Amino acid sequence: MSIRAVPDGSDHAVIELRRVVKTYVMGDVEVHALRGVSIRVERGDFVAIMGASGSGKSTLMNILGCLDVPTRGLFFLDGVDVRTLDEAALSKIRNRKIGFVFQSYNLVPRRTARQNVELPLLFAGLKPAERRARADAALAAVGLGDRAGHMPNEMSGGQQQRVALARAIVLSPALVLADEPTGNLDTATSNEIMLLFSRLNAGGRTIIVITHEPDIAAFAKRTIRLRDGLIVEDRRSVPVEAPPPHPDGTSTLVATGLTVS
Amino acid sequence: MRPLDALRTAWQGATSNKLRSLLTVLGVLIGVSAVIILLAVGTGSSRAVQNRINQLGTNTVTVLSRGRFGRGPATTGTQSQNASLTLQSVQAISDPNQAPDVASVSPVVSTSETATYGAASYSTSVIGTTPAYLPAEDYTVAAGSPITSSDVTNRRRVALVGQTVISNLFATGQNPLGQTIRLGSSSFEIVGVLAEKGTSGVTNQDAVVIAPYTAVQDELTGESASFNELLVQAKSTKGLNSAAAEVESILAAENDTTVANLPFSVINQGTLISTAQSTSSTFTTLLGAVAAISLLVGGIGVMNIMLVTVTERTREIGILKAVGAPRSAVLTQFLLEAVLLSLIGGGAGVIVGVIGTHFKIEGVTPVIAGYSIPLAFGIAIAVGVFFGFYPANRAASLRPIDALRYE
């Protein structure tokens, strides 16, 4: 079974969840984090998953990111049934098909921005010269071409999050998965980061952002709202093929021209 | 993950907390150098013991009359109380038909006398024997000539004198050859000077005067048919045991007894060597065991630090796993880190150990045992793998969500 990137234009969805149930057992208590969630996310979509804490959105994120497996239900990631995969194959999936962006950036300390971006390439087994070229390209794409040699603690929160974003896209994954990516950032920086997501989406990347802030969700083409482990709302504001919306009402295509340095 | 990248990552990890890594390395270093130094001390002291035994004369069998030492198994009624080493026994042992493995036999009468020359005097041991004694005991004549068979037959009062006696009796630069010294009340002419031989255990082998046994019996011990000791030289080291057996059976026949009840002590130099060797190998093993324990402690240090490191870097492990590090890559990284620490400790330990063996320790000149360096180094790496595996496995088994959540 191949888990290599499937050429664009293939008919299967990036994400296909069918009646996914996740139950945690904590002592004697069963916690039903997800009670039957079905979602289909097409290639090129920009989805915001919203919900209060305890709504199951973190659980959903872990399942989508192949960090956790559903108790019941089906999950196809880029056409691959994730439940059939062993640990090594899951590592490979996380490496090639998913790019993570976390709320707390999660950069490895004592490693420069470039070295952090190179991490997924390291596990993909790329040669040093190629790693460096790709990492520098990804850093340039997030507007940090001049910060490659900096340590995480020498950068601002916004810059660190951009490094994380560069790391997420460096292997051109099928899906960029962001968990509260602006949770630690001020409004201006949040907007910059979200514009960066919009730009990546305009470039064809599939993005899922988990957030509880409507302002952030406004950047997405589609908003899914969770409550108590169930989908209570699934609203599309912009078609998949269309450019991502901009909260100001302007098109992000204009915004993409903006320099983010 | 490419091997070189894994190594580089492990190196970065190992050097991220320099003081801690240094202390861990120190633990392994001490262990490895202790193994090398202590084994070298053990080997050195066993060499020294062997050299001393070799100085006593190799391939010799010594027969001691028990009367002189008053020891041995409790005498029974059947045992001859006045058994002695006689000239008859000497002749029997020198008979190549009866004792084909014996090269020579020298009877020995020994006593202690005060040697005087002019105003100087020195208390020395006097050995009365035959010419064959000199090669059997490894004595060489540095100046003059050795005693001869005709000296023995003609009961000539001639003597070979050891270096210590010379230096105590004669002024420096004075030629002792041809001079006459007094042993007790008898005068002996010095015909030869013995080459220096050094000490054997507590015995100064240079504080000796060697003379024909006939003359010693005449002048010092009194005429007697018995000897204190017979020094038997075997034809070869291989034939030492059979020579000893031949001597025993001849003596048993002469004294109408069995080999088991022989009233003499037959000391086989070969047995002495092997006893000494087994003693010193026990000693070396003990030293090695002590050193191995310190190496083990060093290994536990590696494990301890790796456990701390894994706990400290749990979140990092989570990140690595989230970006696609397989279990094997995490395992390799932490295992390599542990092995790197013990490798560096092992390498430095070998250097320190080799330097340390250049010093005399408790009067013993250490001799590096050839096997000890690869052994200590190999054990250090094995320790790294063994004690690194548990922490590395723990890191590799972390679930990425748990690791990412870890604060």
Image: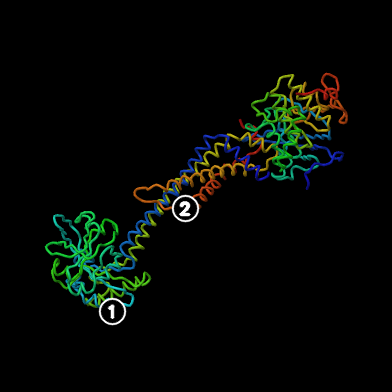
- Residue A125 percent location from the top left of the image: 71, 43
Left or right: B355 as drawn, with respect to B191: right
Residue lying farthest to the bottom in this orientation? B97
Q: Please, which chain is the residue tagged with disc 2 on? A: B
Disc 2 residue type (three-letter) = Ser
Residue A174: where, in percent of width, then height?
A: 79, 37
In this rendered view, identify the residue nearer to me: B127 or B264.
B127
The amino acid at mark 1 is Asp
Asked whether the viewer can see residue A90, the reply is no
Circle 2 is placed at which residue position? B372
* Residue in view at x 55 percent, y 39 percent: B307
Residue A178 visible in the displayed image: yes
The quarter holding residue A32 reads top right
Give x and y (percent) for residue B184: 13, 61
Q: Is residue B179 above or below residue B398?
A: below
Looking at the image, residue A221 sits to the left or right of residue B27; the answer is: right
Q: Residues within 10 Å of mark 1 (few under 14, many from 20)?
A: some
> Dot 2 surroundings within 10 Å: few (below 14), some, or many (20 or more)?
many
Q: Is A180 in front, or is A118?
A: A118
Split into 4 quadrants, where in the image is the N terminus of chain B?
A: top right
User: Residue B95: which numbered mark, if any?
Assistant: 1
- Vertical side of A205 occupied by B272: above or below: below
In the structure shown, which secondary structural element does the residue marked by tag 1 occupy? loop
